[in-house]
Amino acid sequence: MGINELLNSTQIGNWHLKTKIVMAPMTRSFANNETGTVGEDIVHYYRKRAKDGIGLIITEGINPSPRGKGTFGVPGLYTNSQVDSWRKVTEAVHEEGGTIVAQLWHVGRLTHRELTGGLPPQAPSPIKADGLVHRLRKPYDTPEEMTLMDIKEVIQEYALAARNAIKAGFDGVEIHGAHGYLIDQFNCEMTNKRTDEYGGNLQNRLSFMKELLMAVINEVGKDKTIIRFSEIKDDIPGYRWANPEETIKAFIQVFHEVGLQIIHPSTNDFTEKMADDMTFHQLVRKYWDGIIIGVGNLNPQTASKAIAEGTIDLAAFGRPLLANPDFVQKIKEERPLKPYEAAIDLKYLN
Ligand SMILES: Cc1cc2nc3c(=O)[nH]c(=O)nc-3n(C[C@H](O)[C@H](O)[C@H](O)COP(=O)(O)O)c2cc1C
């Protein structure tokens, strides 16, 4: 099978994408640690991907509030100077004919007060995570249980950050509801022990995500809002949904109710079977006929095949794009891809 499926241009709502290749969101920690602004190096990094022919760029996780920060050098979208700094990125990407959305990321309990301006981390329940904070290398802090007022406030922060993203020239936003961060902490029975309407059964636990999506859609529109969700959690290796298909159905019910059009189910292994001899993305496709972004150790061949089969519409690549800033040109010209090497590829913003 060829890779033409991947290289074809496509129209998704108002976005004209040069290819079906998506840059997966990747935290790089090169923003100004004090101000959360991005500089010329980051403008250049994203411009290069757009010029190469990436159809849709999803940025690194961007904090909607200072308390959403989980490591050093993460950018924000809650001050005017942050908005102005991102505008240079979006202008550069648009000059190259690219499309770019901002990933909005609140880490919830997966942080430490040294990173969140001295205030304890926020979470659905006051349950400390196991492990060490990324780069700070200290144990995770015990989070503060969010009050109903805190919940309203964080939803408003997301809505404002989404509005700011549009002000900064982004083509849309991706809500990071995956990998064990704040939204996923509400969604998951291990981290959400609330006894109010945001806790208890799965439907209640998903209601934080639902209200947050409604608030974001209200600001920027359904055609400009993507949700990323997952079973996998960065802090709980081996976590599994007790009933994957029922869980996926419940998530998708919420996505239908709020009117989403594009979803981004995340796994580290696209080919892994989840239930009933089907992969995560195949199970999602059973219940969702809107746009699906696939991801998880894909290569150009597996991605093209999944698009041709109709399992996914767009294919996201993470590590291969760090190792190969000229990824699209290389696969067009059938040149070999350089393998990803964290020690080299994470060190510089290439
Ligand atoms: C350095 C690095 C940083 C990442 N940061 C984020 C992030 O900020 N938000 C997110 O949703 N996923 C993040 N991820 C996960 C990727 O988006 C992607 O799902 C994962 O790397 C699997 O795709 P791949 O096999 O093509 O690399 C990160 C991955 C890497 C390697």
Image (tube, rainbow, N blue to C red):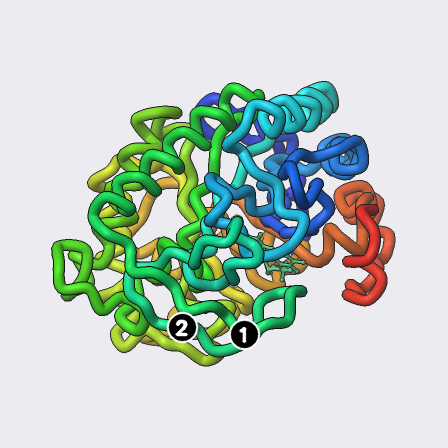
x and y percentages locating residue 267 in the rendered image: 49, 64
Q: How many labels sit on residues?
A: 2
Find residue 276 and report its horizontal and vertical position in percent. Answer: 32, 75
Query: Distance from label 1 to label 2 (Cα)?
Result: 9 Å
Q: Position of residue 7 (x, y in %)?
A: 67, 40
Which part of the image, by quadrant, shows the N terminus? bottom right
As displayed, is residue 78 above or below residue 59? above
Which secondary structure, mark 2? Answer: loop
- Judging from the image, what secondary structure is the residue with disc 1 in? loop
Image quarter for ligand 1 equals: bottom right
Q: Is residue 302 left or right of residue 270?
A: right
Q: Are marks 1 and 2 in contact (CB under 8 Å)?
A: yes
- Horizontally, is 128 left or right of 21 in the view? left
In the image, what residue type sits under mark 2? Lys
Per the image, the residue denoted by label 1 is 139
Looking at mark 1, is its residue's CB closer than 8 Å to ligand 1? no
What label sits on residue 128 in the rendered view? 2
